[in-house]
Amino acid sequence: MSSSSLTTNMTDPSSSSSSGPRWKNILVIGASVAGHSVVNGLAQHLPSGYRVLLIERNAFVHHNPCVVRSLVRPGWDMTNFTAPVRQDTIFPAGSRHRVLAPNRVVKLRRTSVWLEQPFEGVDEVDFEMCILATGAQSPAPIRPIPGCSLDEWRTALRRVQDDIAAAQSILIVGGGSVGIEVAGEINDAYPTKRVTIVHWDVGLLHPSDSGGNTAHTYVAPRTPNKLRKDLESQLRARGIKLQLKDGVDFDAAKGSGQWGGMPGPLGGMRTIPLVSGGRIDADYVFNSTGNRPNSDLVRAADPGSLTTNGYVSVDSFFRVRTRTPNSPLVGNYYAIGDVCNSPSWKTAEAAITEGDALARIITTRLRGMSAQPYSPPGRLLESTVLLGSGGGASIKRFPIIGYVRSEGSVREKSHDFHAGKNFFSRFRGQRRFVSTSSWSLAM
């Protein structure tokens, strides 16, 4: 899309007129789950004179939980679990709020950002508040490479499908939810293939206590043992090998005559060295580790606002923490979702909750009232991990009795990966999505 068509599509003529009103902009960078959720909360309750500008670098967003099946099952790459990021899909007709996509923020300043493409005739947009919701990046193609087209991403998914279909022995590096669900999908589609999960912790997911969250780091909360033990039992019953408290020795893998340490097809059966000294024979390696927060904008503006592991450091109001008064991020920058170190699980449900909470904080402050700080649940309330179309485990936490298994939640997620409640429902524009078996966009 050219910059001229972008400006024509999204400009409110009255806002750019020298005699018309000057909008007070609330910027949201990233149409992630958290970003879209805060946009919906703000759009309904902002005072007159304020507007939301949603800036997204890709022309589309996707429902990430569906990706595990699209990586394995031929044809699933064409299932409509994506949505275009446009004015008519995000906001209703006549809205004063605007979508800038595809567009990219290239620099953060104290009260403005610089854009890659001009908006309303300018490259620099002033704001009253700026919300960073840029999410995290997983190894491609678990999430699309920034700036790629939908066709390019689907091509990458189909390539992985073909590679997995051709493989005999598959090594999955990382036993988090993505690695577990990909293993389940592979076993579901190809029961005779050998599948091994190598994971650093004493059990799948994150059962160990790694210490509490601080201003200088992000530590994922512990996973309840009941959930991971159920998953481990089902995987072993299917013949999937679990190599726990271990990892791939990537230094040894890059040595002379070794497999090179790169994921993907290995061109034949190779011996993979492990940190423990053990070895695994595989002809395909799937990497589900290395989830990295998309915090490069903050790193360029003020590296002191990042934790030691790269997350944007925020306080209990989601305000970006800065270490010096001269930081360009002082004052009106906020961050939510996967990019920040808010003390909660990095799940869609948590991102929606954070988006709603920040919308309340901002609108309360704009009305001149004192906002309440965000306080996430101290324990995981619900979690469901699928193992293909016919298995998985789920837990729910109830007062007094604690965690109980929930087979109903497994069936519910199996239906559409929660796309109906966590994805399609976010789109409130003139063009509405309909959650059906074909997941089609209503015209």
Image (cartoon, rainbow, N blue to C red):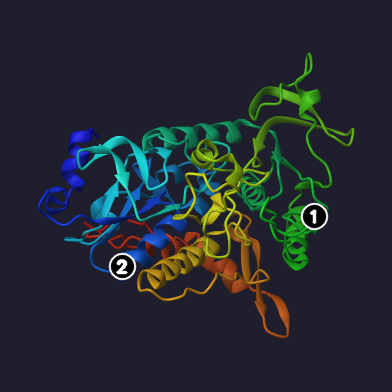
Disc 1 element: loop
Q: Is residue 18 visible?
A: yes
Which of the marked residues, 2 or 1, is nearer the chain's N terminus? 2
Q: Which mark is residue 203?
A: 1
User: Which image quadrant: the N terminus?
Assistant: top left
- Residue at x-position 51% and y-position 64%: 354
Amino acid at circle 1: Gly
Residue 204 position in % (x across, y down): 75, 54
Q: Are marks 2 and 1 in contact (CB under 8 Å)?
A: no
181 and 37: which is toward the camera: 37
- Horizontal relation, residue 94 to residue 162: left or right: left
* Image-quadrant location for residue 264: top right
Residue 104 position in % (x across, y down): 37, 38
- Horizontal relation, residue 60 to residue 66: left or right: left
* Image-quadrant location for residue 235: bottom right
- Horizontal relation, residue 120 to residue 340: left or right: left
Which residue position holds label 2?
Answer: 46
* Image-quadrant location for residue 391: bottom right
